[in-house]
Image (cartoon, helix red, strand yellow):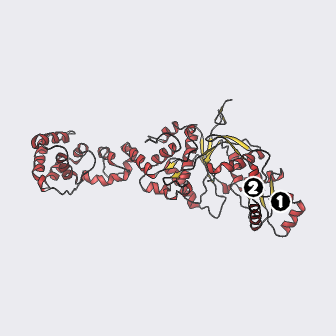
Amino acid sequence: MGELAGVAIGMTVVTRFAPSPTGRLHAGNVYTAVLNWLFARSRGGRFLLRLDDTDRARSTEAFAQGIRDDLAWLGLAPDVEVRQSDRFDRYDAALARLEAAGRVYRCYESAEELELKRKVQLSRGLPPVYDRAALALTESDRVRLEADGHRPHWRFRLDTGAAVAWDDLIRGPCHVDPASLSDPVVRRADGGYLYMLPSVVDDIELGVTHVLRGEDHVTNSGVQLQMFEALGAPPPALGHFGLLTSAEGELSKRLGASGVDALRDSGIEPLAVVALMAHLGTSEPASPTASLTELAAGFDLAKHGRAHPRFDPAELAHLNARLVHGLPFAAVADRLPAGMTEAAWLALRPNLSTVAEAANWWPVIIGPVSAETDPADRDYLAAARAALADLPFGPDVWSGLVERLKAETGRKGKPLFLPLRRALTGRDHGPEMAALLPLIGRDAALERLSA
Ligand code: GLU
């Protein structure tokens, strides 16, 4: 059987998006969701939502619902949702197995003792790595400590013999030296699980084949690869992409203002968000796309590099406008002002940055409009009215009107067009008059020219 990106051909690709429900989604984690969704869909695979809610104090149902709503709005609804808080028995079982195998051990140091150890190491110029003192405890030491009211926390014993290496889907050959790391705490004295082990247990049991996440997890990957091995499971393929930066260059974790809810409220189309994110980190510019299916078909992880892509809200707004210019009536009809026709939408959309702006232009078509006419244009507008009254009012009425007025008055350019636009729409700029005039209609146009 052949190998493709670390996975045997024929195996169903499974990716997951694993946010903690401790806040709304921001640009950084939307990027993670988009890459995982597109990768899964481009391979005919499955995309899971895993709510990392082991931190019971900070996780809320409202944030979990916010994440679901944001994904649904983006069109990235998961095939399956799991919550870590439903799976503590699975983590207990894995912990027990690892403890029996000597890969997890109980520790009793208080936070103050650990802090003191670190200070001493640092003052001696040593790396502040946990000294594994608890490994020397005997069973009777542990019984005595627990009888004295000390509650254990659990650490995973790293194998420090050799570097952990993997071929990263994005970064290429990677390695992490476990000797430079403290044995990670996997369960706290209050019984709560920390992120590291539950994530591995879930990835194994949910059949995750590809883990795509930010480069802030590279060191975690070194640790977690040892956990997969200790649990006797083949690891997923790993890909770590560069974290998003903002236009000012700070890292994505602080891009709080660009929450999905804020994007939605400002009139950004979900497809624009996904289309932009799909291209961030590649050398290809994002372009308006017809559908998520089309994006998935063109998605290739190999185009993503390790650079830190810049998320620029102005670029998103620009892409959004280009997307809106191509949206068919059927895609927007339920968001348009009551009564707006397909012809009106097609006339207006080239001038819109958001669909909602159609409402600002609708009065230009249905009226009433109020226009300030320059007294110097009165005769010109009277001539326009007479010409229009005389012309057949068909789809080409605007060009007929302009040709007639050019010949009659000798005007051209701005003096020819602007007084007409002002009188007919009440504005100096806007959609093509050739498209607007037939929509305004003969009677309303004649009335506006004589007002
Ligand atoms: N909850 C973790 C995070 O948001 C998940 C990391 C992972 O993808 O494994 O950072």
Which mark, residue 133? 1
- Relative placement, left or right, of 203 versus 288 is right
Indicate which disc, 2 or 1, sits on the residue closer to the N terminus.
Answer: 1
* Rendering coords of residue 326 (x, y %): 38, 42
Residue type for callout 2 = Ser
- Inter-mark Cα distance, 2 to 1: 12 Å
Q: Foreground residue, 167 or 393?
A: 167
Residue at point 37%, 50% (across, down): 353
Q: Which residue in the structure is indicated by mark 2?
A: 182
* Rendering coords of residue 14 (x, y %): 63, 42
- Residue 157 vertical placement versus 229 (above, below): below
Residue furthest to the bottom: 148
- Relative placement, left or right, of 116 versus 315 is right
- Relative placement, left or right, of 391 versus 150 is left
Q: Foreground residue, 402 or 283?
A: 283
Residue at point 60%, 42% (across, down): 46
Q: Foreground residue, 226 or 396?
A: 226
* Rendering coords of residue 90 (x, y %): 73, 52
- Relative placement, left or right, of 134 versus 412 is right
Task: Give neighbour class at mark 1: few <14, some 14-19, many 20+ (Cα, 10 Å).
Answer: few
Residue type for callout 1 = Ala
Residue at point 52%, 39% (across, down): 296
Label pair 2/1, CB-CB below 8 angstroms: no
Whether residue 81 appears in this view of the structure is no
Secondary element under disc 1, as helix, strand or loop, is helix
